[in-house]
Image: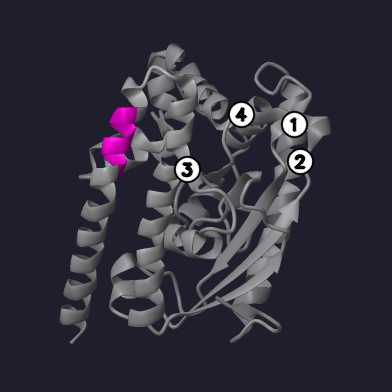
Amino acid sequence: MSFLRVALLSAIAIVSTIVHVIPLLVLTVCKLVLPWPRLRLACNPWLTGLAESWIGVNDWMWDRCTQTRLQLRMDAALARDGHYLVLANHRSWVDILVLQKVFNRRIPLLRFFLKRQLFWVPLLGLAWWALDFPFMGRYTPKQIARDPALAGRDREATRRACEKFRDIPVAIMNFVEGTRYTQAKHDAQSSPFRHLLKPKSGGVAFVLDAMGPGLHGILDVTIAYPAGTPTLLDLLANRVPQVQVRVRERPIPHALIAGDYQNDRAVRVRFQQWLNVLWQDKDGDLTELLAESQATGADAV
């Protein structure tokens, strides 16, 4: 029965992806060839609408085909036409579906910073490109040591992406730990946090610097899986009983982004200290969420 469920839901997801990606790519070609800036700009809502419709199908499958309960605490005022930086802890690929379910059609379409290799994912890679998702090299310290010029490529990609986002409502998503949490990674880092890896400040600082006062706020998202970290297969097979999410709205740290993060070590230290405090709060939220069988006063999505 579980095999049939997974096969059916996978088939629905594939068909939905094809149905949405084909017109999305047609619109993208139109946007590229149109000589009139206003008409090119007018394509953006249609592109976003197709992406939100695709997410809506995924949400429908979650609601109708699984018994997974999503418990949400929302301590933020959301706007469809806002400009947000969304920060979250990272446990599983399921995190992306959780974030899309929480925010779809409540804030602008979430854009993720993706590894460059993901461009080659069938259909989705082209869709992400068409929707202006930034693709990053994610170079290792060893690669940068061999070729120092690589250090600036991801910063330049971030700057170019943020320039595009200034003209449209956007929510830029960043998994600040840089990788999915595992106990082995936690131990290797000697992380001072109970449930989290150490946060990396560079990507957050670059987005805040590039977007500047155009951002309305930071949405700090904490995701907890009381029954253990799931895989996408677990979700499709109906093996995820509950997901708990807390969203807090944080102010933009203007005093920090006014400095030169790249060249001023003192600015980098202060920025990392600010992020560590935010991460300490998140660690406390995770401890609280995981200790509850059902979030008190939560709203079911």
Q: Which residues are magenta?
A: 24-30
Q: Is residue 27 magenta?
A: yes
**CA distance for labels 3 and 1:** 23 Å
Query: Which one is closest to the eye, mark 1 or mark 4?
Result: 1
- Residue 45 badge: 3
Q: Which residue is under mark 4?
A: 206
Residue type (three-letter) at the residue carrying disc 1: Pro
Residue bearing the label numbered 1: 213
Give x and y (percent) for residue 47: 40, 42
* Structural crowding at the residue carrying mark 1, measured as other residues with C-alpha within 10 Å and reported as few (<14), some (14–19) or many (≥20): few
Quarter placement of the N terminus: bottom left
Q: Are marks 3 and 2 in contact (CB under 8 Å)?
A: no
Query: Looking at this rendering, what residue extends furthest in the right direction?
Result: 255
Report the amino acid beneath label 3.
Pro
Front-most of residues 61 and 72: 61
Q: Nearer the viewer, mark 3 or mark 1?
A: 3
Which residue is label 2 attached to?
Answer: 252
